[in-house]
Amino acid sequence: MRHIFIAIVYCFFFGFSGSAHPEQIQSQHDKIIALVDRVAVESPTDYHILVENAEASYTQLQSLSDKLEAARALLLWHFMIDDEEGTAKYASELQQLALALNNQPHFDIARLYQGFTQNPDLEDAVAFVQQWSDSLSASNKQNLRVRVHRDLVITYTKLRPMIFPFELQYLIQHLETISDDPEFAQEKHVILWSLVARGWSIEQSLTYYEEFIAGAEANTFPVHKYLVLYNIAILMASSEYVDAAIYLGESYVELALAQAQLEELFYGYERLGEALSHDKQYQAANIALEQAHQYDMYADELWLAQINLIQAENYFFLGEVDKGRKLLTAAEEALKAQDESYRITTNYVNRVLGKLALLEGRTEDALEHYETYIINNRNDVHQRRIEDIQGVRSSMERLIVQAESSQALAEKRLTQFQYASYVLVAVSLIIVLMAIRQTKISSQLKSKTVELQKINRQDSLTKLFNRGYWELQVHLQISQRKRYHKHIASLALFDIDNFKSINDEYGHVAGDAVIKLVAETVQKEIREVDVAGRYGGEEFGILFPQTSIQAALQVTERIRKALEKAVVEFDNKQITFTASFGLAPLANYHSTAKIWVNEADTALYQSKEQGKNQCTIFSNTTR
């Protein structure tokens, strides 16, 4: 599999280099937040919009020279996200245009990408690159554009299964050579993407990210925002950046919701859930991961096994052993069919099993599982260090032979590349998962209906948000408060007074009609940014972001009065009803959504006790 991120390998096995100073951590944290804010918005550089428009424009071009340049750009844009179908299509277009224009360098570049897409097996890909290189004319072996594309393909191919940081030096050298040449702007864009996707430290990656985004905005080149966000998330695999990781997860979800990108909602909720788990917000994490499961039709079994393991461990921390055991069993079953390539997740099972054994008082079993987990981790690190040393030696040899002729150098590099491809071992599940994600990414560029996205987060009767999605939005407001202490929000719970009597007297169909009218009334009265959901039965919740409790009270009073006047016509009868409300402002001590919701529920209970059909604001005396 191609185009896998070296950042994942490095962060997982080694963490971040050294112990960063608090000032450095804060600086990097601020840069990450700024980068996320810059990326997680709709813009002209959105990959799925820009590429679609470029492909439409391509068919209208009349000049063969213009079409050749456009075909090379589209080829690279599909190649950079590992869309083999699109790469093959425009490689064929480029070959025909190069033949018509008698452009030998572009003809050879087209042949390179055609062979690349036709040889998914690593050994076959290596053999093809060797044959392709041997077939080049002497002049094309010296041609800068040909050499740049050759190293891009070699780098991508070598990333199956892994690439060493030293191997990226060739791309960095090309970047320095072509940096100011507008004729190589497309190649520079893809080289920068390759570097940011495989950065081996946060500082280096952030530097390349800034240049990558700036170049894309200046030239209107495509940026696959979701891959960028996921890449950044991988770089933040340290507890020092957990706040930024949560912020990124929230931004990822908001962007995917705004663009109705259903596949990306799976990855966004998965990122948010894992970040919350790292922050020990286990309940909120599992809510996010449950949301991810609503989009699991887009995920591979290995992704689902990974999510199940995270949820299982979270439930163990929460003391809900039965729920955790069920998810752990499901993950183990999914992993039984996998080979040794997935040893990292298989080893994660040992850690979760250890936690379960500890909770059940099986101390010896717990120690055995934890010992196995630690030993396997050490073995993986040891193996990775051996491979890294091999990479250093290989790179040093390549630097030594730079003084040789270009033809001899090319042969030497390809020989070393071929040798390295045989000795590299399969790496962690995380790498495999990212490869799966990359190979599937083109499918999410197809049209996805907003209706399916709505079904996954809507209550079927009222068309308001369902409880799970509404609770997640409540949690997001708490996260905002933790980052920005001046952030305000208010929450209201309300239910229909004497609703059981309505059902008993008029029947459940009439009761459903009342519930629908309540939902319609709420939607008319609230703002677009407010979040209304059906909490359960005849109970509803409204979240008011950036709203004081007094302003929220004004809205709920309007809703209460409107419901008081409402009439449901049913079976020649007029049904009237009222509702009681409880409100609570967001406070710094709200560490979980449950605490905040419980306060609104307490205020709602007081409204009931004081005669119903009224609104009550929670205060400490309300407890």
Image: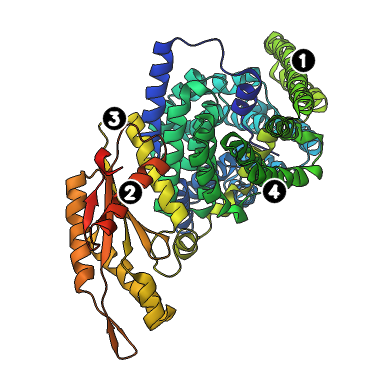
- Depth check, mark 4 against mark 3: the one in front is 3
Q: Earlier in the sequence, mark 2 or mark 3?
A: 3
SS at badge 4? helix
Q: Which residue is mark 2?
A: 602
Circle 4/circle 1 CB separation < 8 Å: no
Q: Earlier in the sequence, mark 4 or mark 3?
A: 4
Whole-percent x, y for residue 408 in the image: 75, 18
Rounded to the nearest angstrom, the CA distance separating label 4 from label 3 is 40 Å
Residue nearer the viewer, 474 or 603: 603
Circle 4/circle 2 CB separation < 8 Å: no
| Residue visible at 55% across and 20% down in the picture | 172
Q: Which residue is mark 3?
A: 485
Rounded to the nearest angstrom, the CA distance separating label 4 from label 1 is 31 Å
| Residue visible at 33% across and 69% down in the picture | 498
Residue kind at label 3, given as amino acid type:
His
Q: Which of the 4 image quarters holds residue 461? A: bottom left
Q: Earlier in the sequence, mark 4 or mark 1?
A: 4
Q: Which of the 4 image quarters holds residue 438? A: top right
Whole-percent x, y for residue 82 in the image: 61, 42
SS at badge 2? helix
Q: Which residue is mark 1?
A: 386
Q: Is residue 554 left or right of residue 236?
A: left
| Residue visible at 69% across and 37% down in the picture | 432
- Depth check, mark 2 against mark 1: the one in front is 2
Whole-percent x, y for residue 19 in the image: 52, 10
Rounded to the nearest angstrom, the CA distance separating label 3 from label 1 is 47 Å
Q: Earlier in the sequence, mark 2 or mark 1?
A: 1
**CA neighbours of label 3 inside 10 A, class few (<14), some (14 to 19), many (20+):** few
